[in-house]
Image (cartoon, rainbow, N blue to C red):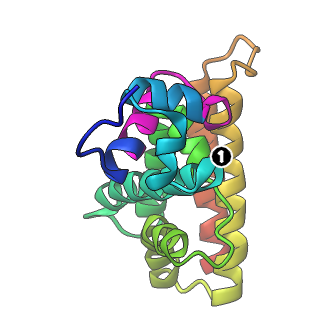
Amino acid sequence: MAARAGLTRHDVVGEALRMLDEGGRLADITLGELARRLGIRPQSLYAHVDGTDGLARAVAVAGLHALASDVTEAAIGASGTDAAAAVVRAHLSFARRRPGLYEAAIHPPGDDPDLLLAIDAAGSPLERILTSMGIEPDERVHWTRVFLASVYGFAVLQQAGRFALPVATSVSEDRLVEMLTDSLLTRTA
C-alpha cells in the first residue's frame, strides 16, 4: 500500500476521533486499523504520531479542546452556582455525545506542555467560577477533583449501562448537579 500523499498529523488525529465517535474506545484503536482506514502502512503513522502513546496524547489534546469549547460556551452569561451547574451539565452532555473522546481526554499530563495547556483550557471556566465565588486556591483544587470524579464517574457508569435501577438517570443527573452546587454554596456561606 503506497503512502497517501499530503497526509497530515491533523488527518491522522481526525480519523482517530472519527473512530472514537463511531463508538470506539481509545484502548481498542490499533495503529494497524487506523492506518488501514487512512490507506497507509502502519509504520507510516510514525511520521505523524509517536506510536500509541503519541496518538493517545494527540487525541487527549483534541478532546480537551473540544470539551473546553463546550464548557466555555455553557458558562457564558451565567455566574455563581448557575455557571457551575452549566459546566457540570456541559461535561455530562459532552460525555453522552462523545463518550470515547471524553474518556480519552482524561489523560495524565506529566510535563507535556500541550496537554497542560489543553487541561487549563478545559478547566479554566470552572476555575474562574470558583474564584469569582471566593473559593480559596487549595479548596478550588479539592472541589475540582470532586467535580471531575463525580462527573467522570457518572458519565462512564451511565455510558456502560451500569445504572440498572428503574429510575430515570436524568433525575439522578439533576441530583448530581444539585449536590455539587449545594456543596459550593456551603463553601461560600
- Residue 185 seen anywhere in this rendered image of the structure: yes
In the rendered structure, which amino acid carries the disc numbered 1? Tyr
- Segment tinted magenta in the rendering: 13-30
Residue on which the image places disc 1: 152
Residue 64 among those drawn in magenta: no
Number of numbered discs overlaid on the protein picture: 1
Q: Are there few (<14), some (14-19), or many (20+) residues within 10 Å of tag 1? A: some
Quarter the N terminus occupies:
top left
Report the residue at 61% width, 42% height from top. 103
Q: What x and y, as percent, mark residue 62?
A: 42, 54
Q: Position of residue 16 (x, y in %)?
A: 46, 37
Can you name the residue that lies furthest to the top here? 166
Q: Is residue 23 above or below residue 186?
A: above
**Left or right of 142, for residue 169:** left
Q: Position of residue 173 (x, y in %)?
A: 59, 36
Within the image, what quadrant is residue 5 found in? top left
Q: Position of residue 74 (x, y in %)?
A: 33, 54
Q: Residue at x 25, y 64 (%)?
A: 77
Numbered disc 1: secondary structure: helix
Q: Tell me the quadrant of the picture where the C terminus can be found.
A: bottom right
Q: Is 12 or 163 nearer to us in this picture?
A: 12
What secondary structure do most residues of the magenta stretch adopt? helix
As drawn, 112 above or below 146: below
Residue at 62% in and 26% down: 159
Question: From this viewpoint, is residue 189 visible?
Answer: no
Magenta region includes residue 29:
yes
Q: Residue at (39%, 58%) from the top-left corner? A: 65
Out of 38 and 124, give the one closest to the viewer.
38
Left or right of residue 86: residue 116 = right
Q: Nearer the viewer, residue 51 or 26?
A: 51
